[in-house]
Image: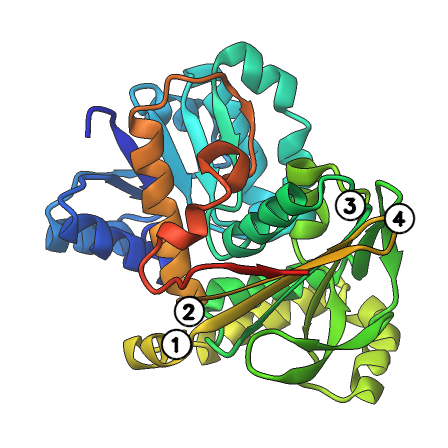
Amino acid sequence: MNKKWMLYGANGYTGKLIAAEAEKRGLTPILAGRTLESIKPLADELGFEYRIFPLTDHQALEEALSDIDIVALCAGPFSATSDPVIKACLVTKTHYVDITGEMDVFVRAHSFQEQAKAAGVVVCPGVGFDVIPTDCVAARLKEQLPDATHLCLGFDSRSGFSPGTAKTSIEGFKGGNRIRKDGVIKKVSMAYKVREIDFGKGLKKAAVIPWGDVATAYYSTNIPNVEVFMPAFSSMRRLKLLNLLRPIIALPFVQSRMKQKIEKTVPGPTEEQRKKYVTHVWGEVKNRKNETRTARITVANGYDVTVYGVLASIEFLDSYTGEGGYYTPSLLMGKDLIERFSGSQKMTITE
């Protein structure tokens, strides 16, 4: 590689996977995080440089990024970490990618479009499982039905949660369930809509979830109506009960206690579990004539997809000479991006 890059949050579950794969590929990120005791042992083990600084110290953040060409942010919750890093990147002229799946973070990152373009800086959040597979499905479907007005996306995965993903889910629950209708993100109830979907292994009952594509798929396709589905592993009655519990779960002290429990009890999936569970991704578009197209693709488990996605974005940006600005993964690296990853099958699209 010609450009210098940093992996911030390298001590987390996903960060360690990315760092290990980078070492296997001969890549040399600078590992970074808040505490010496969490970063130095990993850096020493892999033979990488390291830097220690908090994201709350703006001066230290800008100094740490002053000679960095690309930063991959893997420390969440991204509702707290993304904003200061993007702002610093605009100053230091550093390309920015992250692995968020938080809808509000995508919306906020998109608001930096003009500043990023003026600075010549690429801002591309969500270069992991959130949202590369579904984003590529959305882009391919738009290509097949250019006048589509409605887009539905979904995935079926049993990969399990890492501590960071579990905490992000708790954080995101405060915002409630959401869809995009007529170009605007709107709140809806849990179990707002339920339908049977064949994600790739037979029909399953699925419910609408507040996935990041409600923001990003609109940026990628300009389709004004977007819904994302996931198999309803809980009963509809339990999902509806969450509508009543959400105000309680959103309380700061409840959020804090739940995240503390996650730290102690959620280790993340093992390598064996990651190899065992693939992910089935589905999408459907419809236009005003009720013409439809349906896409399906089977990909690796979400954590492996995230590792591949981060490293693909780093390698892409190493030789990037295009304009700065906000990008989704498919807009930046191509709608066939997911199909280039190990473990991905060829996407099928049917009428």
Q: Of discs 1 and 3, which sits in the foreground?
A: 3
- Name the residue tied to disc 1: 269
**SS at circle 2:** loop
- Name the residue tied to disc 2: 301
Mark 1 / mark 2, whichever is N-terminal: 1
Asked whether, in this view, residue 287 is left or right of residue 263, the answer is right
- Seen at 87% across and 70% down, the residue is 192
- Seen at 67% across and 83% down, the residue is 203
Q: Of discs 3 and 2, which sits in the foreground?
A: 3
- Seen at 36% across and 50% down, the residue is 340
- Amino acid beneath label 3: Ala
Q: Position of residue 147 (x, y in %)?
A: 78, 40
Q: Position of residue 92 (x, y in %)?
A: 42, 17
Mark 4 / mark 1, whichever is N-terminal: 1
Q: Is residue 340 above or below residue 346?
A: above
- Seen at 60% across and 16% down, the residue is 115
